[in-house]
Image (cartoon, grey):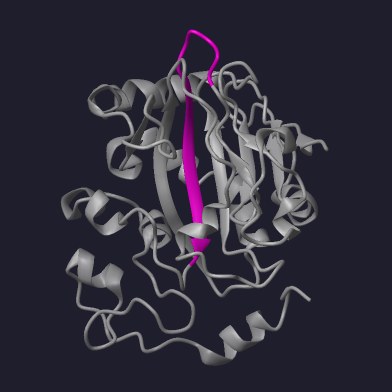
Amino acid sequence: MAIPRFDRTASGADVAEALAREGCAIVDRLVAPDVLDRVEAELQPWLAATPVGTDDFAGRRTRRTGGLVARSPTCRELVQHPTVLDAVGTALRHATTFHLHLTQVIAIGPGEPAQPVHRDQWAFDFFPFPRGYEVQCNTIWAMTDFTAENGATRLVPGSHLAEDRLELGQDATVPAEMPKGSVLFYTGALYHGAGANRSGAVRRGVNITYAVSWLRQEENQYLSVPHDVARTLPDPLLRLIGYARGAYALGYVDDLRDPLAVLRGTSAPAFGLGDLERAQAKLGDGRPS
């Protein structure tokens, strides 16, 4: 039960193939370690101010700092990394579009026990999505080395195709050990959980998740990224965080206006409900059997 691994030259298609087969993959050293040092420097005030979790699932020795698009220019680069977007776009190609679902730094402190094994897509009211129909593609960038000792995320490779609502123990998992600058991919259906931190240091990772655009985002990007900040961001990033039509006809403003035009205060014509023929054609390809 091994996690597929690639070097930094891997294509998004390589990663997506591994995700389809095993539900997870690691790309070693996709960015240089100093990129994650920049992330930590940019986020330091918020990292220091974030309280620990209030229950066993969130982690009573774990801090979860969000709002990364607004707070960290370097995290915007990670959100838009070409290899990641290529892999996500391929893994979620059965949907018309995808968007940013959440951003957070997960900092697991010493003494934190292992998180219960779960599926991230249970956040959608435990809806029983069809087996093989993925609605999320998650990434965790290693801000520190991830080891079995310091709480590396633990996965059950292949479990994205298993029955729902399983109760799995830590003995069913393997640690996603990886050096700083690496990125772990896993789907929303994969059973996983944060490992126990038995070291004397904090384990930090940047969790950036994407989801099909017809599902609500876990992190409210429109409030996490204030409008005065959003107006300074490039259009592709704004489209990714949600200022775009989702699926066929979701996300327009009042009289069928483009949300990006509304944000920027530009006079743009109504952009309609969407291209129905294109959506139908796309959904005819890559649908799970």
> Relative to 42, does residue 67 appear above or below in the rendering?
below
Q: In which quarter of the image is residue 103?
A: top left
> Relative to 189, does residue 273 appear above or below in the rendering?
below
Say if the magenta span includes residue 200: yes
Residue placed at 35% from the left, 58% from the top?
A: 238
Image quarter where the N terminus lies is top right
Q: Which residue lies furthest to the top in this view?
A: 200
Q: In which quarter of the image is residue 2?
A: top right
Say if the magenta span includes residue 126: no
The range drawn in magenta is: 197-212
Image quarter where the C terminus lies is bottom right
Residue placed at 37% from the left, 63% from the top?
A: 242
What is the x, y in percent for residue 168? 67, 44
Residue placed at 75% from the left, 40% from the top?
A: 10
Which is nearer the eye, 116 or 94?
116
The secondary structure that most of the magenta stretch takes on is strand
